[in-house]
Amino acid sequence: MTIRFALPKAIAQLFALLSLSCLLAAPGSPAVAPANAAAAVQVAVSILPQKYFVQRIAGDLAEVTVMVPPGADPHTYEPKPSQMRGLAGAKLYMTIGVPFEKAWLERITAAGGKDMTMVRLEKGIDLLPQDEHFLDEDHGHDADHAKPGHKENGHKDGHHAEAAEGHHHDHDGGDPHIWLSPALVKMMAGSIKAALVKADPAHAPLYRANHDAFVRELDELDLHINGLFENVPENRRRFMVFHPAWSYFAHNYNLREIAIEVEGREPGPKQLTRIVEFAKKEKIEAIFVQPQFSKRGAETIARNVGATLIEADPLAEDWAANIRRVAEAMANTLSK
Protein backbone atom coordinates (compact mmCIF):
# COMPACT_ATOMS: atom_id res chain seq x y z
CA MET A 1 0.00 0.00 0.00
CA THR A 2 1.36 3.43 -0.98
CA ILE A 3 0.81 6.32 1.39
CA ARG A 4 0.84 9.82 -0.11
CA PHE A 5 1.15 12.99 1.91
CA ALA A 6 -0.35 16.13 0.40
CA LEU A 7 1.44 19.40 1.16
CA PRO A 8 -0.81 22.33 2.04
CA LYS A 9 -1.38 24.41 -1.08
CA ALA A 10 0.40 27.54 0.24
CA ILE A 11 3.51 25.55 1.20
CA ALA A 12 3.59 23.79 -2.14
CA GLN A 13 3.41 27.11 -4.00
CA LEU A 14 6.22 28.56 -1.90
CA PHE A 15 8.38 25.50 -2.54
CA ALA A 16 7.80 25.83 -6.29
CA LEU A 17 8.73 29.50 -6.30
CA LEU A 18 11.93 28.86 -4.37
CA SER A 19 12.90 26.06 -6.72
CA LEU A 20 12.26 28.25 -9.76
CA SER A 21 14.34 31.10 -8.37
CA CYS A 22 17.26 28.75 -7.83
CA LEU A 23 17.02 27.49 -11.40
CA LEU A 24 16.89 30.98 -12.85
CA ALA A 25 19.79 32.40 -10.85
CA ALA A 26 22.54 33.35 -13.29
CA PRO A 27 26.05 32.08 -12.66
CA GLY A 28 28.22 34.82 -11.21
CA SER A 29 25.28 36.95 -10.12
CA PRO A 30 25.46 38.20 -6.54
CA ALA A 31 23.87 36.18 -3.79
CA VAL A 32 20.86 38.07 -2.51
CA ALA A 33 18.78 38.19 0.59
CA PRO A 34 15.18 36.98 0.36
CA ALA A 35 13.03 39.46 -1.52
CA ASN A 36 10.93 40.27 1.54
CA ALA A 37 13.93 40.83 3.82
CA ALA A 38 14.69 44.40 4.89
CA ALA A 39 18.02 45.79 3.66
CA ALA A 40 20.70 45.28 6.27
CA VAL A 41 22.71 48.37 5.30
CA GLN A 42 21.63 51.78 4.03
CA VAL A 43 24.38 53.04 1.70
CA ALA A 44 24.65 56.45 0.02
CA VAL A 45 26.97 57.05 -2.95
CA SER A 46 27.77 59.95 -5.24
CA ILE A 47 27.32 58.50 -8.76
CA LEU A 48 25.46 55.64 -10.46
CA PRO A 49 28.46 53.39 -11.22
CA GLN A 50 29.11 53.18 -7.47
CA LYS A 51 25.61 51.80 -7.01
CA TYR A 52 26.49 49.00 -9.43
CA PHE A 53 29.67 48.19 -7.48
CA VAL A 54 27.90 48.11 -4.12
CA GLN A 55 25.07 45.95 -5.40
CA ARG A 56 27.47 43.46 -6.96
CA ILE A 57 28.95 42.89 -3.51
CA ALA A 58 25.94 43.40 -1.23
CA GLY A 59 23.06 42.20 -3.41
CA ASP A 60 19.71 42.97 -1.82
CA LEU A 61 21.32 43.42 1.60
CA ALA A 62 22.10 47.05 0.77
CA GLU A 63 19.68 49.81 -0.12
CA VAL A 64 21.69 52.25 -2.22
CA THR A 65 20.89 55.95 -2.60
CA VAL A 66 22.61 57.91 -5.40
CA MET A 67 23.17 61.63 -4.95
CA VAL A 68 23.82 62.63 -8.60
CA PRO A 69 20.79 61.56 -10.71
CA PRO A 70 20.98 60.39 -14.34
CA GLY A 71 21.86 63.20 -16.74
CA ALA A 72 23.26 65.49 -14.03
CA ASP A 73 26.89 66.66 -13.93
CA PRO A 74 28.88 65.48 -10.86
CA HIS A 75 31.25 68.41 -11.32
CA THR A 76 28.63 70.99 -10.43
CA TYR A 77 25.68 69.09 -8.92
CA GLU A 78 23.96 70.52 -5.83
CA PRO A 79 22.01 67.93 -3.78
CA LYS A 80 18.39 68.75 -3.06
CA PRO A 81 17.28 69.38 0.55
CA SER A 82 15.27 66.14 0.43
CA GLN A 83 18.42 64.22 -0.50
CA MET A 84 20.32 65.72 2.39
CA ARG A 85 17.52 64.81 4.80
CA GLY A 86 17.53 61.27 3.45
CA LEU A 87 21.14 60.81 4.54
CA ALA A 88 20.01 60.64 8.15
CA GLY A 89 19.27 56.93 7.72
CA ALA A 90 22.50 56.03 5.91
CA LYS A 91 25.03 53.81 7.66
CA LEU A 92 27.69 54.35 4.99
CA TYR A 93 28.50 57.16 2.56
CA MET A 94 30.98 56.19 -0.16
CA THR A 95 32.89 58.98 -1.88
CA ILE A 96 34.78 58.54 -5.16
CA GLY A 97 36.49 61.91 -5.55
CA VAL A 98 34.12 63.70 -7.95
CA PRO A 99 34.26 67.51 -7.69
CA PHE A 100 30.84 68.17 -6.11
CA GLU A 101 31.94 66.17 -3.06
CA LYS A 102 34.55 68.81 -2.19
CA ALA A 103 31.92 71.50 -1.83
CA TRP A 104 29.34 69.31 -0.09
CA LEU A 105 31.30 66.79 1.99
CA GLU A 106 31.06 68.67 5.30
CA ARG A 107 27.31 69.13 4.86
CA ILE A 108 26.91 65.48 3.81
CA THR A 109 28.79 64.35 6.93
CA ALA A 110 26.65 66.58 9.12
CA ALA A 111 23.43 65.35 7.50
CA GLY A 112 24.40 61.72 8.04
CA GLY A 113 25.19 62.27 11.70
CA LYS A 114 27.44 60.32 14.03
CA ASP A 115 26.03 56.94 12.94
CA MET A 116 27.15 57.35 9.31
CA THR A 117 30.65 56.21 8.32
CA MET A 118 32.46 57.94 5.45
CA VAL A 119 34.20 55.48 3.09
CA ARG A 120 36.64 57.05 0.63
CA LEU A 121 36.86 54.74 -2.38
CA GLU A 122 39.46 56.96 -4.02
CA LYS A 123 41.86 56.51 -1.10
CA GLY A 124 45.13 54.86 -2.07
CA ILE A 125 44.66 55.39 -5.82
CA ASP A 126 47.34 57.35 -7.68
CA LEU A 127 45.52 59.88 -9.83
CA LEU A 128 46.57 60.76 -13.36
CA PRO A 129 47.52 64.41 -13.82
CA GLN A 130 45.26 66.95 -15.50
CA ASP A 131 48.01 69.39 -16.44
CA GLU A 132 48.70 68.43 -20.05
CA HIS A 133 47.02 70.74 -22.57
CA PHE A 134 46.10 70.63 -26.23
CA LEU A 135 45.58 73.75 -28.40
CA ASP A 136 46.69 76.12 -25.65
CA GLU A 137 45.89 79.49 -27.22
CA ASP A 138 47.52 81.49 -24.43
CA HIS A 139 50.96 79.91 -24.80
CA GLY A 140 50.94 78.73 -28.40
CA HIS A 141 51.64 75.15 -27.42
CA ASP A 142 51.20 72.41 -29.97
CA ALA A 143 49.66 69.01 -29.27
CA ASP A 144 52.93 67.43 -28.22
CA HIS A 145 53.96 70.10 -25.73
CA ALA A 146 53.80 69.43 -22.00
CA LYS A 147 53.84 72.20 -19.41
CA PRO A 148 57.07 72.89 -17.52
CA GLY A 149 57.22 70.77 -14.42
CA HIS A 150 54.92 68.09 -15.88
CA LYS A 151 55.74 64.69 -14.39
CA GLU A 152 55.23 61.51 -16.35
CA ASN A 153 54.74 59.38 -13.22
CA GLY A 154 55.92 56.31 -15.09
CA HIS A 155 53.20 56.49 -17.76
CA LYS A 156 53.90 56.04 -21.45
CA ASP A 157 54.37 59.23 -23.45
CA GLY A 158 51.22 60.46 -25.14
CA HIS A 159 48.81 58.28 -23.21
CA HIS A 160 47.56 60.81 -20.69
CA ALA A 161 44.37 62.76 -21.18
CA GLU A 162 45.01 65.90 -23.18
CA ALA A 163 42.67 68.80 -22.56
CA ALA A 164 41.77 71.30 -25.26
CA GLU A 165 42.89 74.54 -23.56
CA GLY A 166 42.26 72.97 -20.16
CA HIS A 167 38.97 72.86 -18.32
CA HIS A 168 37.84 74.51 -15.12
CA HIS A 169 35.92 71.62 -13.58
CA ASP A 170 37.92 71.81 -10.34
CA HIS A 171 40.06 68.74 -10.90
CA ASP A 172 42.80 70.01 -8.60
CA GLY A 173 44.87 67.08 -7.42
CA GLY A 174 44.28 64.86 -10.44
CA ASP A 175 41.72 63.26 -12.72
CA PRO A 176 38.76 61.94 -10.67
CA HIS A 177 37.32 59.49 -13.26
CA ILE A 178 38.84 56.42 -11.61
CA TRP A 179 35.74 54.23 -12.01
CA LEU A 180 36.34 53.80 -15.77
CA SER A 181 39.29 51.47 -15.17
CA PRO A 182 38.48 47.82 -14.33
CA ALA A 183 41.83 47.58 -12.51
CA LEU A 184 40.95 50.51 -10.23
CA VAL A 185 37.43 49.19 -9.68
CA LYS A 186 39.07 46.06 -8.25
CA MET A 187 40.77 48.27 -5.65
CA MET A 188 37.50 50.01 -4.85
CA ALA A 189 35.70 46.65 -4.56
CA GLY A 190 38.04 45.71 -1.74
CA SER A 191 37.18 48.92 0.12
CA ILE A 192 33.45 48.34 -0.40
CA LYS A 193 33.69 44.77 0.91
CA ALA A 194 35.62 45.87 4.00
CA ALA A 195 33.11 48.62 4.78
CA LEU A 196 30.12 46.30 4.39
CA VAL A 197 31.71 43.58 6.55
CA LYS A 198 32.40 46.11 9.29
CA ALA A 199 28.92 47.63 9.10
CA ASP A 200 27.12 44.28 8.91
CA PRO A 201 29.36 41.46 10.21
CA ALA A 202 26.44 39.02 10.32
CA HIS A 203 26.53 38.80 6.52
CA ALA A 204 30.32 38.90 6.12
CA PRO A 205 30.56 35.52 4.31
CA LEU A 206 28.11 36.69 1.65
CA TYR A 207 29.95 39.98 1.11
CA ARG A 208 33.27 38.16 0.78
CA ALA A 209 31.90 35.58 -1.65
CA ASN A 210 30.26 38.22 -3.83
CA HIS A 211 33.42 40.32 -3.77
CA ASP A 212 35.50 37.39 -4.99
CA ALA A 213 33.03 36.66 -7.79
CA PHE A 214 33.01 40.33 -8.81
CA VAL A 215 36.82 40.45 -8.92
CA ARG A 216 36.86 37.41 -11.21
CA GLU A 217 34.41 39.16 -13.53
CA LEU A 218 36.58 42.29 -13.55
CA ASP A 219 39.62 40.22 -14.48
CA GLU A 220 37.69 38.58 -17.32
CA LEU A 221 36.46 41.98 -18.56
CA ASP A 222 39.98 43.41 -18.45
CA LEU A 223 41.32 40.44 -20.41
CA HIS A 224 38.52 40.81 -22.99
CA ILE A 225 39.21 44.52 -23.52
CA ASN A 226 42.95 43.94 -23.83
CA GLY A 227 42.21 41.37 -26.52
CA LEU A 228 40.03 43.83 -28.42
CA PHE A 229 42.88 46.33 -28.84
CA GLU A 230 45.69 43.81 -29.22
CA ASN A 231 45.99 44.19 -32.99
CA VAL A 232 45.18 47.90 -33.33
CA PRO A 233 48.25 49.66 -34.84
CA GLU A 234 50.05 52.23 -32.68
CA ASN A 235 49.23 55.10 -35.05
CA ARG A 236 45.47 54.45 -34.72
CA ARG A 237 45.22 54.10 -30.94
CA ARG A 238 43.66 57.50 -30.21
CA PHE A 239 40.23 59.02 -29.93
CA MET A 240 38.58 62.37 -29.23
CA VAL A 241 36.06 63.14 -26.53
CA PHE A 242 34.29 66.32 -25.40
CA HIS A 243 35.12 66.02 -21.70
CA PRO A 244 38.25 63.98 -20.83
CA ALA A 245 36.58 61.36 -18.65
CA TRP A 246 38.25 58.31 -20.22
CA SER A 247 41.91 58.89 -19.40
CA TYR A 248 42.19 55.88 -17.05
CA PHE A 249 40.56 53.67 -19.65
CA ALA A 250 42.96 55.05 -22.26
CA HIS A 251 45.97 54.61 -20.00
CA ASN A 252 45.05 51.00 -19.13
CA TYR A 253 44.73 49.95 -22.77
CA ASN A 254 47.56 51.97 -24.31
CA LEU A 255 45.26 54.48 -26.00
CA ARG A 256 45.38 58.26 -26.31
CA GLU A 257 42.50 60.53 -25.29
CA ILE A 258 42.20 64.03 -26.80
CA ALA A 259 39.65 66.48 -25.38
CA ILE A 260 37.48 68.81 -27.45
CA GLU A 261 36.18 71.05 -24.69
CA VAL A 262 37.60 74.52 -24.04
CA GLU A 263 37.49 75.31 -20.31
CA GLY A 264 34.46 73.08 -19.93
CA ARG A 265 32.60 74.76 -22.79
CA GLU A 266 31.97 74.17 -26.49
CA PRO A 267 34.99 75.30 -28.56
CA GLY A 268 34.53 78.58 -30.41
CA PRO A 269 34.99 78.87 -34.19
CA LYS A 270 38.72 79.56 -33.93
CA GLN A 271 39.39 76.63 -31.58
CA LEU A 272 37.09 74.35 -33.57
CA THR A 273 39.01 75.10 -36.77
CA ARG A 274 42.29 74.18 -35.09
CA ILE A 275 40.82 70.99 -33.63
CA VAL A 276 39.51 69.95 -37.07
CA GLU A 277 42.95 70.60 -38.58
CA PHE A 278 44.57 68.52 -35.86
CA ALA A 279 42.02 65.71 -36.25
CA LYS A 280 42.67 65.57 -39.99
CA LYS A 281 46.42 65.55 -39.47
CA GLU A 282 46.17 62.81 -36.85
CA LYS A 283 43.52 60.93 -38.84
CA ILE A 284 41.19 60.71 -35.84
CA GLU A 285 38.61 57.99 -36.44
CA ALA A 286 36.62 57.83 -33.16
CA ILE A 287 34.96 60.61 -31.19
CA PHE A 288 33.18 59.95 -27.89
CA VAL A 289 29.97 61.82 -27.13
CA GLN A 290 28.22 61.66 -23.79
CA PRO A 291 24.75 62.72 -22.57
CA GLN A 292 26.08 65.16 -19.95
CA PHE A 293 27.49 67.50 -22.61
CA SER A 294 26.54 68.98 -25.97
CA LYS A 295 27.33 66.97 -29.12
CA ARG A 296 27.51 69.92 -31.52
CA GLY A 297 31.28 70.35 -31.54
CA ALA A 298 31.88 66.61 -31.84
CA GLU A 299 29.39 66.34 -34.69
CA THR A 300 31.08 69.19 -36.57
CA ILE A 301 34.49 67.58 -36.21
CA ALA A 302 33.16 64.16 -37.24
CA ARG A 303 31.59 65.59 -40.41
CA ASN A 304 34.80 67.32 -41.39
CA VAL A 305 37.19 64.44 -40.77
CA GLY A 306 34.96 61.41 -41.43
CA ALA A 307 35.19 60.14 -37.85
CA THR A 308 32.70 57.81 -36.14
CA LEU A 309 30.70 59.12 -33.15
CA ILE A 310 30.55 56.65 -30.27
CA GLU A 311 28.02 57.07 -27.45
CA ALA A 312 30.05 56.71 -24.26
CA ASP A 313 28.32 57.58 -21.01
CA PRO A 314 30.87 57.56 -18.16
CA LEU A 315 28.02 57.59 -15.64
CA ALA A 316 25.96 54.65 -16.93
CA GLU A 317 24.41 52.59 -14.15
CA ASP A 318 25.07 49.22 -15.81
CA TRP A 319 28.79 49.78 -15.54
CA ALA A 320 30.10 46.46 -16.91
CA ALA A 321 27.81 46.38 -19.96
CA ASN A 322 28.65 50.01 -20.71
CA ILE A 323 32.43 49.53 -20.52
CA ARG A 324 32.23 46.43 -22.69
CA ARG A 325 30.02 48.15 -25.31
CA VAL A 326 32.24 51.25 -25.51
CA ALA A 327 35.42 49.15 -25.81
CA GLU A 328 33.94 46.96 -28.54
CA ALA A 329 32.64 49.97 -30.50
CA MET A 330 35.99 51.73 -30.27
CA ALA A 331 38.04 48.66 -31.17
CA ASN A 332 35.77 48.00 -34.15
CA THR A 333 36.22 51.60 -35.35
CA LEU A 334 40.00 51.69 -34.88
CA SER A 335 40.50 48.29 -36.51
CA LYS A 336 38.75 49.12 -39.79
Image (cartoon, helix red, strand yellow):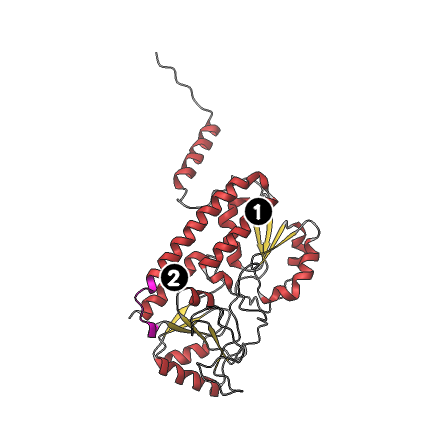
Q: Is residue 72 left or right of residue 226?
A: right
Residue 95 lies, in percent from the top left, at 59, 58
Q: Quadrant of the C terminus?
A: bottom left
Q: Is residue 119 above or below residue 12?
A: below
Mark 1: amino acid: Leu
Q: Is residue 88 above or below residue 34?
A: below
Among the two numbered marks 2 and 1 on one chain, the one whose residue lies closer to the N terminus: 1
Residue 272 lies, in percent from the top left, at 45, 84
Q: Magenta span covers which residues? A: 228-236
Q: Which residue is mark 1?
A: 196
- Extreme residue in the top direction: 1
- Magenta stretch holds residue 232: yes
Q: Which residue is at a point 43% across and 54% down the rendered structure image?
A: 218
Q: Which residue is mark 2?
A: 325
Crowding around mark 1 (Cα neighbors within 10 Å: few <14, some 14 to 19, many 20+) is many
Crowding around mark 2 (Cα neighbors within 10 Å: few <14, some 14 to 19, many 20+) is some
Q: Quadrant of the N terminus?
A: top left
Q: Which residue is at a point 38% across and 15% down the rendered structure image?
A: 3
Mark 2: amino acid: Arg
Q: Which residue is at a point 55% across and 69% down the rendered structure image?
A: 174
